Image (spheres, rainbow, N blue to C red):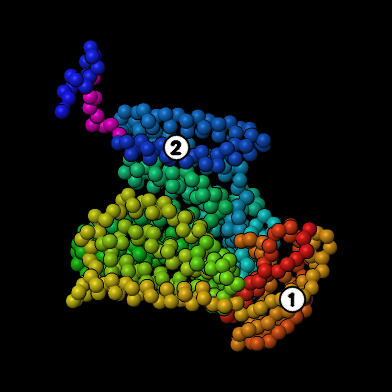
Amino acid sequence: MLLTDEQLSAPGRRPLPAVPATPESPAQWHRVLTLLADISLFIGTRTVWTQAATHRPLLAGLISLCYVSVLGCGVLALVVRRERSLARVDLCVLVTAVTLVLCTWALNHGGSDEAALTTQAARELVAGHPVYNHPWPWLFGRSVALTPTVTGGYDYTYGYPPLAPLLTAPLLWLGHGGAPATVVATGALAVGAVLLWRLLPTPWRSAATMVCLGFGFLPTYGRLGYPAILALALLVPVVVRWPRIGRGGLLGPAGIARAACLGAACAAQQLPWFLAPFLLAGVYAVRRGELGARAAALVVLRITGIAVTVWLLINTYFIVSEPVSWLKGIALPLTQGAVLHGQGLVDVSLYLTDGSDRLDWYSHASVLLLAGLLAVFVLFVRRLGPAATVLPWLAFYLATRSQDGYFLMMTPLWLAAAVTAPASEFAGSWQPRPRPHRRPARIAAAALVLAPALVCAVLAVTGSPPLHTRLTSVRADKRTLSRLTLQVTNTGDDALTPHFTLTRGQGMYPYFEVLRGPATLPGHATATYELRPPLGAYALPHPGQRVRMRVFTPSPQTLSSSWITLPTA
């Protein structure tokens, strides 16, 4: 039985009329997004305020005002009635986020190894000295991390394209250390966040604040002086609405500027090198569906030509003054032979097994996966087009250096593509259609191009450690160890040059010095090695703390690990 409105209303009380939504009333999801961006500003803010309250009371006061802004924006995000008013709240959240980022930089701007190397490269540039292939070991100490290599040494040289040092050079007056480089990176992040905020549709702008500045991890990379943050800022205008580049066969001033930004980004750091092929392939597919093959190819050639020209202009001085060193320097991250590190597949060899004699296959798998993903992207561009800014980073999961920074530093580009490059932009894109059995043939082709990467990955993780180590003696006092003696057996056919270190978790202690033992251990041979800690003493572990001996070799690249028992402090 249905009840009438009069029966549903309370006795003696007239029902309240429904209040219609005004045309400019903001959507509830917009309110929630603004609120989430506002809440994200709390992350890490208390730590910064505590630090400032002790030494920088004026900064602490400014951070306290930011707390007021966060609280006020939280209220306003839920109560304002007009879309325009909520847009102003979004702007207030952005300004608050930028203020907090700058306050945090003012307290913590020493930088990391990236900042130290970039600043030193800028100093060498200003002095007219070579920048590339020159080690600067004095930059590294207890507070600056080292990048160990499988050769038993460390990378002390600058290994990025030159845009970051060029922008850092005018800021060297800021002082010693890595502060000038952190200014460039943090400033680039703030500009990139504001630019992304401005380019996104109004309801989505708070997402830019949240992803770029709110969670805290990208501002941290900025304060550490990573050149990748500069590259990220330059890629923002490239990625926003990127399928529309060259629409109608014309680039126009905006398209030329975006192509120039792509070239500049590639001159700032190597990560854009991996993204550029996907963007160019996607633009070709979209334009070919609109204009045909020849016109699409001309659009892509113009974009590539502008990007390469800008890239060459930024690199010209170094190409002329130190061509060989420059080429080795910008290729260094791909050739330096850094030890395994990260959260990717290499963890199998690092933590789940005792190593592998096929570490090179991780690199092979990574390169092949990148090529395979690009081929699959072309085959299924209508489906995968929106994921063009995410796909390249999958290849790093198989690399020997697979730390999460490679994934998360470009996440604002994921947001930009998700909002401004939806699947509808690729509906008319060209994609290969083999005959007969079009779809099964494309699926089979995709499996075929991805299979080599899978095979290489399996070979890498199933390798066995070539060196077996046995601890024979330890020289130590109550707190420190001064000597280790090992018996090492090479179970393989290849002669290996071992380099020894200890780990207590995911970190790696500096390499031990070999006092006695052959530099190269022939295949199927056994030798005794006496090792000394690099500083003459190694702190003994606490009771229950496990220590692992790791032995790296450079050619072929191998890792052999074994748990050892040391006296406890």
Quarter of the image where one finds residue 280: bottom left
Amino acid residing under circle 1 = Leu
Q: Nearer the viewer, residue 436 or 377?
A: 436
Magenta stretch: give its range: 16-26
Asked whether, in this view, residue 243 is left or right of residue 166, the answer is left
Q: Is residue 69 left or right of residue 353?
A: left
Left or right, 187 with respect to 383, comes to right
Tell me: 104 left or right of 191. Answer: right
Rounded to the nearest angstrom, the CA distance separating label 1 from label 2 is: 57 Å
Q: Residue at x 66, y 71 (%)?
A: 562
Which x, y percent locates residue 518?
73, 83
Quadrant into which the N terminus falls: top left
Residue 282, above or below 15: below
**Relative to 51, does residue 128 appear above or below in the rendering?**
below
- Residue at image position (51%, 33%) is 66
User: At 38% across and 40% down in the image, what residue appears?
Assistant: 33
Q: Number of labelled discs?
A: 2
Quarter of the rendering occupied by the C terminus: bottom right
> Residue 23 in magenta?
yes
Q: Which residue is mark 2?
A: 38
In the picture as drawn, the residue positioned furthest to the front comes out as: 1
Residue 65 is at least partly visible in this image: yes
Q: Which residue is mark 1?
A: 486
Q: Is residue 162 visible?
A: no
Quick one: 414 or 289, which is closer to the camera? Answer: 414
- Splitting the image into 4 quarters, where does residue 516 fall? bottom right
Earlier-in-chain disc, 1 versus 2:
2
Is residue 336 magenta-colored?
A: no
